[in-house]
Image: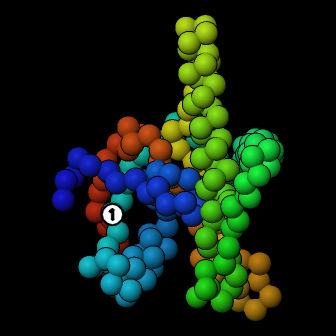
Amino acid sequence: MNPNHVEKSNRPYDWLGNGFYVWENNFSRALQWAKDKASKNEITKASVLGVVYTLSNCLDFTDSAFIDSISTYYYLMKNELEKVNIKLPKNRNHRKDKHNDKLIRELDCAVIEYCHAKIDQEIKFQMTSKGFSYLQAYDSVRGLFTEGGEAFPGAAIQKKNQIQVCIRNVDMIKGFFIPKVQYS
């Protein structure tokens, strides 16, 4: 274990693209996720670590302007893929998810990564052609997710509602701490 190394996820179905994932202010959901992983022997012991971070330049899907922006990138990507006869990835249900929450988010991940790549490409072009760029790469991505089935009969509130943050630039992580919460 190296405490100075932060491991980023880069799976094609990551909900907010590639990066280091945290739940925003949701110790219980983080612990539930860890317990699920431990029960499948994917990790040794369920535990939660707190993270102090800043969003900085954030692609924030709790803000309508960013949702409009990512929609534009979807259509750009769709058009590019159609020109070379490649099908768009799709968000899919996990075979064990009885709520059909589309937990495998390959389309979302691809569009977000496409957005980042296009911005990086434009920054490089401007730096080469002008010597500067006003554009900035996103340091983080933030999104609100609902999943897990109704909290009670007829509810729109879901059992596993959450805000997730994907930290792309690990310099935005200021530190880690052990939460002062009792594990059950």
Q: Quadrant of the C terminus?
A: bottom left
Q: Is residue 59 left or right of residue 31?
A: right
Q: Is residue 97 above or below residue 171?
A: below
The percent coordinates of residue 109 (x first, y second) are 61, 56
Name the residue at 65% across, 41% down. 115
> Residue 111: in sight, yes or no?
yes
The percent coordinates of residue 80 (x first, y second) are 76, 43
Helix or strand or loop: what does disc 1 sit on? loop
Q: Amino acid at mark 1?
A: Leu
Residue indicated by mark 1: 49
Determine crowd level at label 1: few under 14, some 14-19, many 20+ residues with C-alpha closer than 10 A.
few
Name the residue at 76% across, 92% down. 153
Q: Is residue 30 left or right of residue 111?
A: left
Q: Is residue 125 left or right of residue 69?
A: left
Name the residue at 36% across, 59% down. 50
Name the residue at 28% across, 62% down. 178
Q: Quadrant of the N terminus?
A: bottom left
Q: Quadrant of residue 102?
A: bottom right
Question: Could you say which is closer to the camera, residue 133 or residue 150?
Answer: 133
